[in-house]
Image (cartoon, grey):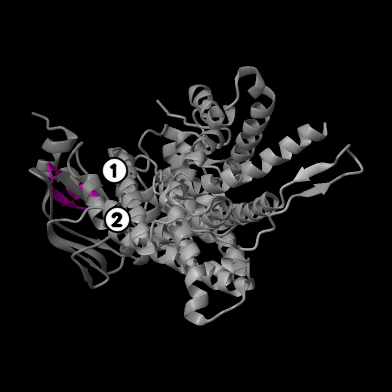
């Protein structure tokens, strides 16, 4: 029982991190109907910026405190993501209003290459580390309740907590504010949104900014776990099955989808792995996504695709 | 009727619009007076919807200009049009399907929202008060259109006739001075048409809103409009009050059916 719970909790925490990546996709899809292939590149770019800034800032400003340096670096990286969002709108999206989804999708592929290229040429292509002082050592909890207690990875726990708070705030923002409503309106129908005076351009900048901040948080958390390197861009691939499971238009879907995949991966690896030779963790999520595509293509919480005939 | 038809508020001068080699509109001029109901009629493909799209800036005409309250616009866009008090409905309803009726109407208040993103994010005093004030306006529109019972229903689930009404509601929530209606009664049954007519006349009468509408149902058009423009193959072939238009031989042969 203790072992099962330990696996379960490990899965939930890993799942929360998947949710965080998936959230980037959902945000942009919700607000502009674009499937943003550049999300992974944004995570990499943000993480690179964060890693380099936190290394450079102590030299530039002579700050000794690691906490202060990290805070300044985080704010700078955040500001940089704002600039990136603004540039993307200015140079790419503005010219593609009312275009087909496929056109916009290709445009985001282009954005991905540019971001990766610019990111590595400005910040270098070595492997960097981000050290935001997350507690590394695992702790034992509930030692009284179970034999041997539960071993919890503190770092994962803090990361999951941060992700949960961010996700909650975003869900509230979308549902409860006037700007959130305008974002949802734009997602539903560009033309109608324009006709009632919702400024498409400003909305797009806002949503790419928010996605940029989400990418930054994801980049910092994943970066401090895995190190900042080019492969971080492929972390976004982990988010893909999550959005298919949860539904492309649902923020709660991204969270629950992430949790299901996180838990599913870990449990199947531990309990089914020995039977069929292990390595399940690698493909489990994609298999699950495939099943969903076959039987429930809109995902768990996505808007049902109804066509009036 | 109590309303007084006023000065020219919207003037279209020599508007021509082409898509590649297809001439959708050729040299069309007409004006709209304040508080009037102005209809645009014509057979299918005559350029009626294109005309409306030009007024609201969805299409940019190659030639001609739009003069709105004395202000010249050679390049209109939907955002500018909305800011200038023009709102519209769509021929094939363009509502935000995932949202409920209230939220759809609230989006119509977007231009009036003053609080900034940060205030909204924290539901700060001003943002909160503002949201409530807008909600009151929206509830008034809901009462006006008699759609109280579907306030919280996602619009995608509503029957067609009601969606049309919500579409009108969203346009009304903007408190427009000019309302463009693209076939407000298309696909409706007699009862729904009567309701829609009543709403259009009430909007015009109570709020003094100037209305430009496209409609296929000739009986309706002749009944409710003050003046009618007739288009055929992108050209203007008639303009005047319903009686004049009915008597215009060109219009009769093009649209009403000639008695050969």
Residue topped by disc 2: A92
Element assignment for label 1: helix
A16 or B138: nearer the viewer: A16
- Dividing the image into 4 quarters, which one contains the N terminus of chain A? top right
How dense is the environment of label 2, judged by Cα within 10 Å: few (below 14), some, or many (20 and up)? some
Q: Is residue B168 visible?
A: no
**A144 on left or right of A274:** right
**B172 on left or right of A169:** left
Residue topped by disc 1: A103
Stretch of the chain drawn in magenta: B232-244
Task: Count all numbered tags in the image, as a single digit.
Answer: 2
> Please, is residue A22 above or below residue B38 in the view?
above
How dense is the environment of label 1, judged by Cα within 10 Å: few (below 14), some, or many (20 and up)? few
Q: How far separated are the C-alphas under marks 2 and 1?
A: 11 Å
The answer to which quarter of the image holds residue A90 is bottom left
Chain ID of residue with mark 1: A
B150 or B213: nearer the viewer: B150
């Amino acid at each position: 029982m203790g072992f099962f719970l330990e696996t379960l909790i490990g899965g939930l925490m890993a799942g929360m991190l998947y949710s965080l990546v998936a959230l980037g996709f959902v945000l942009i899809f919700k607000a502009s109907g674009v499937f943003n292939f550049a999300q992974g590149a944004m995570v990499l770019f943000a993480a690179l910026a964060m890693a380099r800034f936190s290394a450079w800032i102590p030299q530039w400003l002579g700050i000794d405190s690691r906490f202060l340096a990290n805070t300044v670096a985080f704010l700078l990286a955040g500001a940089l993501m704002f600039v990136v969002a603004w540039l993307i709108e200015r140079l790419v999206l503005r010219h593609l209003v009312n275009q087909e989804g496929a056109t916009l999708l290709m445009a985001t592929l282009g954005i991905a290459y540019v971001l990766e290229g610019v990111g590595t040429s400005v910040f270098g292509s070595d492997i960097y580390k981000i050290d935001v002082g997350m507690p590394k050592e695992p702790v034992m909890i509930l030692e009284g309740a179970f034999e041997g207690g539960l071993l919890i990875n503190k770092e994962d726990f803090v990361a999951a907590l941060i992700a949960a708070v961010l996700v909650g705030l975003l869900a509230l923002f979308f549902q409860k504010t006037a700007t959130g409503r305008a974002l949802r309106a734009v997602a539903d129908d560009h033309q109608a949104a324009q006709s009632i005076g919702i400024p498409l351009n400003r909305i797009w900048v806002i949503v790419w900014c928010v996605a940029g901040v989400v990418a930054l948080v994801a980049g910092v958390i994943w970066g401090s776990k895995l190190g900042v390197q080019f492969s971080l861009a492929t972390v976004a691939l982990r988010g893909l099955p999550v959005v298919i499971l949860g539904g492309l238009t649902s923020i709660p879907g991204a969270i629950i989808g992430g949790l299901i995949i996180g838990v599913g991966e870990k449990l199947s690896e531990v309990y089914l792995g020995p039977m069929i030779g292990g390595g399940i963790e690698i493909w489990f999520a994609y298999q699950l996504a495939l099943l969903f595509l076959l039987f429930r293509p809109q995902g768990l919480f996505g808007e049902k695709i109804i066509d009036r005939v | 009727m109590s309303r007084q038809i006023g000065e020219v508020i919207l003037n279209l001068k020599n508007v021509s619009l082409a898509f590649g080699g297809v001439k959708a509109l050729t040299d069309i001029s007409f004006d709209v007076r304040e508080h009037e109901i102005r209809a645009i009629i014509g057979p299918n493909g005559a350029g009626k919807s294109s005309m409306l799209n030009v007024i609201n800036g969805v299409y940019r005409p190659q030639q001609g200009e739009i003069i709105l309250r004395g202000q010249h616009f050679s390049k209109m866009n939907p955002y500018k049009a909305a800011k200038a008090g023009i709102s519209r409905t769509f021929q094939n309803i363009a509502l935000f399907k995932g949202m409920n009726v209230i939220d759809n109407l609230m989006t119509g208040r977007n231009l009036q929202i003053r609080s900034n993103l940060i205030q909204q994010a924290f539901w700060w005093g001003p943002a909160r008060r503002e949201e409530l004030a807008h909600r009151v306006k929206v509830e008034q529109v809901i009462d006006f259109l008699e759609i109280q019972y579907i306030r919280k229903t996602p619009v995608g689930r509503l029957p067609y006739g009601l969606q049309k009404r919500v579409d009108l509601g969203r346009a009304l929530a903007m408190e427009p001075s000019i309302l463009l209606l693209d076939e407000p009664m298309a696909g409706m049954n007699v009862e729904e048409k009567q309701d829609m007519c009543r709403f259009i006349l009430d909007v015009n009468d109570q709020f003094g809103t100037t209305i430009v509408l496209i409609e296929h149902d000739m009986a309706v058009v002749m009944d409710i409009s003050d003046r009618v423009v007739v288009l055929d193959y992108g050209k203007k072939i008639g303009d005047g009050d319903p009686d004049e238009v009915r008597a215009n031989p060109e219009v009769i042969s093009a649209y009403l059916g000639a008695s050969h």
